[in-house]
């Protein structure tokens, strides 16, 4: 299985994520961690529900608008729905015990030089490398 390298789309996405994280911190004093933002729009609702809903809506509708404008997003999900659900549950447990998600720690926490976030991001990356190696070279999927 070959992963397509998309440097311009990746750079553009990274720049937009960085700008959104900076603007959210500058104007609201909040960290752009998707888990924390999402938690605030689910009952019980946060008092700052509006910006959270707008942020999530932007994360959902921006790719939709990109595709409607003629762009393509190469995307393939070979595992079964059952494996996706199991993977989602594992990620959810990790987010809970890791006190945040990859976007909160990797983008915002590291930018603030948070030792906890730097450690968490190193753990995320090591786990990612091991997972990809096992799936591609040991299991052979």
Image: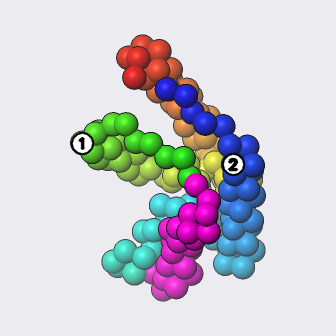
Q: Residue shown at 54%/47% (left/top)?
A: 74
Magenta stretch holds residue 66:
yes
User: What colouring method underlies this structural image?
Assistant: rainbow
Of the numbered discs 2 and 1, the one sitting upstream in the chain is 2
Q: Secondary structure at mark 2?
A: helix
Q: Secondary structure at mark 1?
A: helix
Q: Main secondary structure of the magenta part?
A: helix
Q: Residue shown at 61%/63% (left/top)?
A: 70
Q: Is residue 20 above or below residue 133?
A: below
Q: Position of residue 69 (x, y in %)?
A: 62, 69
Label 2: few (<14), some (14–19) or many (≥20) C-alpha neighbours in 10 Å: few
Q: Residue furthest top?
A: 138
Q: Position of residue 58 (x, y in %)?
A: 56, 72
Label 1: few (<14), some (14–19) or many (≥20) C-alpha neighbours in 10 Å: few
Q: Residue shown at 58%/55% (left/top)?
A: 72
Name the residue carrying label 2: 10
Name the residue carrying label 1: 82
Tell which of 73 and 37 is nearer to you. Answer: 73
Q: Is residue 22 above or below residue 12?
A: below
In which quadrant will I find the C terminus?
Answer: top left
Q: Is residue 120 left or right of residue 93?
A: right
Residue 127 appears anywhere in the view: yes
Q: Position of residue 34 (x, y in %)?
A: 52, 62
């Amino acid at each position: 299985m070959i992963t397509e390298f998309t440097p311009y789309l990746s750079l553009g996405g990274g720049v937009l994520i960085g700008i959104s994280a900076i603007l959210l911190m500058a104007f609201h004093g909040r960290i752009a961690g998707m888990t924390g933002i999402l938690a605030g729009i689910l009952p019980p609702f946060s008092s700052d529900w509006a910006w959270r809903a707008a942020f999530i809506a932007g994360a959902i509708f921006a790719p939709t608008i990109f595709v409607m404008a003629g762009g393509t997003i190469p995307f393939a999900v070979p595992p079964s729905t059952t494996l996706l659900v199991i993977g989602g549950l594992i990620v959810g447990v990790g987010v809970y015990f890791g006190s945040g998600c990859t976007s909160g720690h990797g983008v915002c926490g590291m930018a603030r030089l948070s030792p906890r976030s730097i450690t968490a991001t190193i753990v995320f990356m090591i786990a990612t490398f091991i997972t990809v190696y096992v799936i591609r070279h040991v299991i052979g999927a």
